[in-house]
Image (cartoon, grey):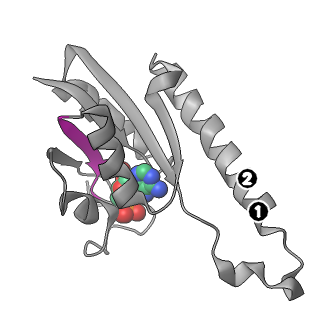
Amino acid sequence: MYTTVLVAVDLSEDSKKVIETARKIAGESSKLHLVHVVEPVTAAYSMDIYAINVSEMQQEAIKFAEEKLLEIGQQLTIDADRVHTLLGAPAPEIRNLANEIGADAIVIGSHGHSGWKILLGSTAIKVLHGSTCDVMTVHVGKND
Ligand code: AMP
């Protein structure tokens, strides 16, 4: 039985299935952690001509993700200190956090926003490469 399980969610509807599966593989006394990584707003939008405040947009995205993830955590009675909203590239951030919290398993969806047709380059594959603990993918998508 795994003792510390990190569940990576993209905040889509599929997140529920990923979390449910994580609960099944986690033991009664296991610690379940949730993570969502907000990707940096790209520099392309920071050009003055667009008149967009990039740092405001970034803060809004982080705030939205934090609230949404905390809401999911509360529904599942996961303590707030085990709910992590991070900023950066999803795969390395998920792997680093798994190391930090001493996770013995990462649970992640097989597909997400990028769609079920795109497997290569998906977050799940990137997390798998270089991970130092078990990685379980949960089949999600249109063909389930
Ligand atoms: P994708 O790479 O978009 O096909 O997503 C595959 C799976 O990776 C999703 O079902 C989530 O479990 C996870 N995932 C994707 N993006 C993120 C993210 N930004 N933060 C945390 N997990 C993510």
Instruction: Residue at 59%, 65% (x, y): give it.
Output: 40
Q: Is 26 displayed left or right of 66 in the figure? A: left
Q: Quadrant of ligand 1?
A: bottom left
Q: Few, some or many C-alpha atoms within 10 Å of disc 1 (few <14, some 14-19, many ≥20)?
A: few
Establish if 123 lies above or below 62. Answer: below
| Residue 41 x %, y % | 64, 68
| Residue 144 x %, y % | 25, 53
Magenta-drawn segment: 104-110
Q: Few, some or many C-alpha atoms within 10 Å of disc 2 (few <14, some 14-19, many ≥20)?
A: few
> Residue lying furthest top in this view?
29
| Residue 48 x %, y % | 86, 84
| Residue 58 x %, y % | 70, 59
> Which residue is more in the foreground, 122 or 132?
132
Q: Is residue 107 magenta?
A: yes
Residue underneath mark 2: 59
Instruction: Residue at 35%, 59% (x, y): give it.
Output: 92
Residue underneath mark 1: 55
Q: Is residue 74 visible?
A: yes
Mark 1 residue element: helix
Query: Which quadrant of the structure image shows residue 5?
Result: top left
Instruction: Residue at 74%, 52% (x, y): give it.
Output: 60
Q: Is residue 37 magenta?
A: no
Q: Main secondary structure of the magenta part?
A: strand
> Which residue is more in the foreground, 128 or 72?
128
| Residue type highlighted by circle 1 | Ser
Instruction: Residue at 41%, 35% (x, y): give it.
Output: 34
| Residue type highlighted by circle 2 | Gln
> Residue lying furthest front in this view?
100
Q: Specify whether tag 2 is near ligand 1 (CB below 8 Å).
A: no
Q: Mark 1 near mark 2, Cβ–Cβ under 8 Å?
A: yes
> Residue lying furthest left in this view?
1
Residues at marks 1 and 2, CA–CA distance in whole angstroms: 6 Å
